[in-house]
Amino acid sequence: VSYKLISRSGSESDLSDMIRRCNQAGVRTYVDIVVNHMSGYKDGDTLGTAGSVANYGQRSWPAVPYGPGDFHPTCDISNYQDRQQVRNCQLSSLADLNQTVPHVRDMIVGYMDHLTDLGVAGFRIDAAKHMWPEDLEVIYGRLKDLNTDFGFPANTKPYIYQEVIDLGGEEIKKSEYNHLGAVTEFKFSTDIGLVFRNKIPLKSLKNWGPEWNMLPSEDVIVFVDNHDNQRGHGAGGADILTHKVPSLYKPAVAFMLAHPYGKVARVMSSYAFDNSDQGPPAHEDGSIKAPSFLSNQQCDTANNGWVCEHRWPEIVEMVKFRNLVNDAPLENWWDNEGKQVAFSRGNKGFVAFNLEEDSELDVNLSTGLAAGE
């Protein structure tokens, strides 16, 4: 409805303060922005969370402002083999912006630059495959450098990662976008779910990476699940692993963090939900609840609703592992032709996985590590 930074989470001042405090603590902020479209079909006016009013039928979003000349002609996407339709028609009946229009580009760049002024480190570009790469290239090229007041090096552009769902079989390919910035590699998410659900042999992970029809490691953000596909939205369906299956989810996340494929790995942190449209834990007035913690510093999910996978000890320790091994190569691969695998990261780290329900991993392995004391 608008690009105003006001929501049930707070005001722009609240957001600015949060970004400032996060930067001071060494935590960078990346904003998920929606610039492919505006709000969807509704008779009459739509009221936004910041109090802005829009009218879909009149193609009017005055709070930006956008008017009829800023949108593609009205049509809905029905054929994902038609690239013109995918990029020029409406996704889920949401009013489709025309990023070729100079005014639209100006508004998007202004929105992103304002967030950069507040101290963000980069952006996730929602629905990137529904926009023309050449338009995005112009928009990205106009963005200002990161704000050095928040400790960013001079002459550094925002980090861009783009949502491009491509599992193969559609006309638009993720390879059309990785020259512009990083791409969310959804095939990583779907295939790692299949492996750890035992639908693909664990030993197959020996050549995990581009040989699985994924983009080069330096071009991707990898993840086991995200906010969409953990709810059954987007790609992957019921094979996506989430916090709801912790016995499989934890080793899958551990593998992601242990393996060198994927320059950037994203760890999910969720709230509990029973249906895909359920919002975050909230008070009766709609304000979002803060998480509460148990004595072991994990979130009190049963009483508060926040899951906080990033605090699970298995994930905490594997983040440390990933940071320690850094870019060390994968070596000393071993598997038992079943559900046990192991490998080293150069001479810096070694990890083993045992998904056998009734068998211990009891074997002498070459770890690549220095001899212990």
Image (cartoon, helix red, strand yellow):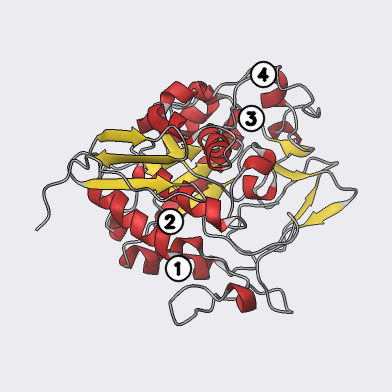
- The mark nearer the N terminus, 1 or 3, is 1
Q: Is residue 154 left or right of residue 228?
A: left
Circles 2 and 1 in contact, beta carbons < 8 Å: yes
Q: Is residue 336 visible?
A: yes
Cα separation between marks 1 and 4: 40 Å
Number of residues whose C-alpha sits closer than 10 Å to that of mark 3, classed few (under 14), some (14–19) or many (20 or more):
many
Look at label 4 and name its amino acid.
Answer: Arg
Q: Quadrant of the C terminus?
A: bottom left
Q: Is residue 179 visible?
A: no
- x 22%, y 39%: residue: 366
- The mark nearer the N terminus, 4 or 2, is 2
- The mark nearer the N terminus, 2 or 1, is 1
Q: Image height check: is 356 above or below 208?
A: below
Cα separation between marks 2 and 3: 24 Å
* Residue occupying the far right of the picture: 43
Rendered image: mark on residue 18: 1
Q: Secondary structure at mark 3?
A: helix
Q: Image height check: is 159 above or below 4?
A: above
Q: Is residue 67 left or right of residue 107?
A: right
Q: Nearer the viewer, residue 371 or 234?
A: 371
Rendered image: mark on residue 83: 4
Q: Secondary structure at mark 4?
A: helix
Look at label 3 and name its amino acid.
Answer: His
Q: How many marks?
A: 4
Q: Nearer the viewer, residue 62 or 299?
A: 299
Q: Position of residue 310 (x, y in %)?
A: 45, 61
Q: Circle 3 is placed at which residue position? A: 130
Cα separation between marks 2 and 1: 9 Å
Rendered image: mark on residue 157: none
Q: Circle 2 is placed at which residue position? A: 29
Q: Nearer the viewer, residue 168 or 158?
A: 168
